[in-house]
Amino acid sequence: MQLNNTSQYAIRILSYIARKQDEHLLSANELSKILNIPYKFLTKIMTKLVKAEFVESVRGRDGGFRLKDDAQKISVDDVLNLFNDSIKDEQCLLGIGACDTQCKCAMHDQWMKPKLLIQKLFRKSSIKDISKKGSKI
Amino acid sequence: MQLNNTSQYAIRILSYIARKQDEHLLSANELSKILNIPYKFLTKIMTKLVKAEFVESVRGRDGGFRLKDDAQKISVDDVLNLFNDSIKDEQCLLGIGACDTQCKCAMHDQWMKPKLLIQKLFRKSSIKDISKKGSKI
DNA sequence: TATTAATTCTACCTAAAGGTAGTAATTTAA
DNA sequence: TTAAATTACTACCTTTAGGTAGAATTAATA
């Protein structure tokens, strides 16, 4: 019951870029070292973030990454979606197909409240919100 | 962001046994067919449930499984723990080691509320609670 | 223009989750 | 006492997540 490794990395990467990008472009090398993410795995994730247009890349010497849009416009949920890690509306805690009010699994009712809270949290939290200083990276 | 397959199966199995066990012992064959869980995988899970003393088994012809203790005494969280799928107190949403009030990840504060709700849900829900009729199995 | 520091691409490797196969052991009942 | 129905055990297979390697491409600058 937790986020997968890749989406954890992705959120931390975007959050760090949002925090630092006014100072300079962020290279894969810097991101890898500071965030303690294996370099080659990080570049793989960066490629996905570029293709999804969350970040844009500048190639060549002195290149690096920056956010494509305003950090306020990217939600945590957007990122989780890219890595198939978002909580879908029809998600059933016990994995028995689609749960709804008519036909529910044994934990449907109790699960609704935390599920909605989490969905809301992910949807309302922007990369900007979580990039504020003063927290671990 | 969801329970792993094995713990979903385990909860459904225990819940079904709790619902039916007064009628007869439940064989792996019946459980597999009704719950739509691959037979060989199910027997593997049953072995763990037996070793963890959630259920006891009767071998030989006409054998099967029944709960070892009162279904009220087994919580969903107990089951999740067996399959390393419970949410630990120190669990950090972004996977940066231990998060606490002194040294937090960027989502620590917002994550606390849903996390506590889920922990409470898992800890307070007994197998008996979720075995009541009228829901999908 | 050559060097260097960067991203990108393709392909592969490893570990863990999920699932399968075959056989041994146990018990009941015909 | 033997056949059938059951759980238990050991070993393996498959898929996916996580991670690595190496070479190609790009662009700044000396």
Image (tube, coloured by chain):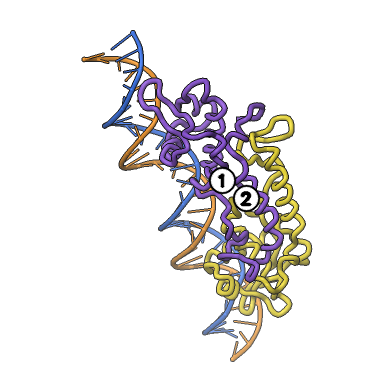
Chain colours: A yellow, B purple, C blue, D orange
Q: Which mark is residue B77?
A: 1
Q: Are marks 2 and 1 in contact (CB under 8 Å)?
A: yes
Residue B2: image location, x then y, percent:
61, 47
Identify the residue at image location x=64%, y=27%: B133
Quarter where residue D20 is shown:
bottom left
Which is more toward the observer, A115 or C14? A115
Q: Are marks 2 and 1 on the same chain?
A: yes
Q: Which chain is indicated by disc 2?
A: B
For the residue labelled by badge 2, is the local secondary structure a helix, a strand or a loop?
Answer: helix
Please state if B10 lies on the left or on the right of A119 as rendered.
left
Residue type at mark 2 is Gln
Please state if A51 lies on the left or on the right of D2 as rendered.
right
Q: Which mark is residue B119?
A: 2
Residue A54: image location, x then y, percent:
71, 62
For the residue labelled by badge 1, is the local secondary structure a helix, a strand or a loop?
Answer: helix
Please state if A73 lies on the left or on the right of B88 as rendered.
right
Between marks 2 and 1, how big is the CA–CA gap? 8 Å
The answer to whether B77 is drawn above or below residue B99 in the figure is: above
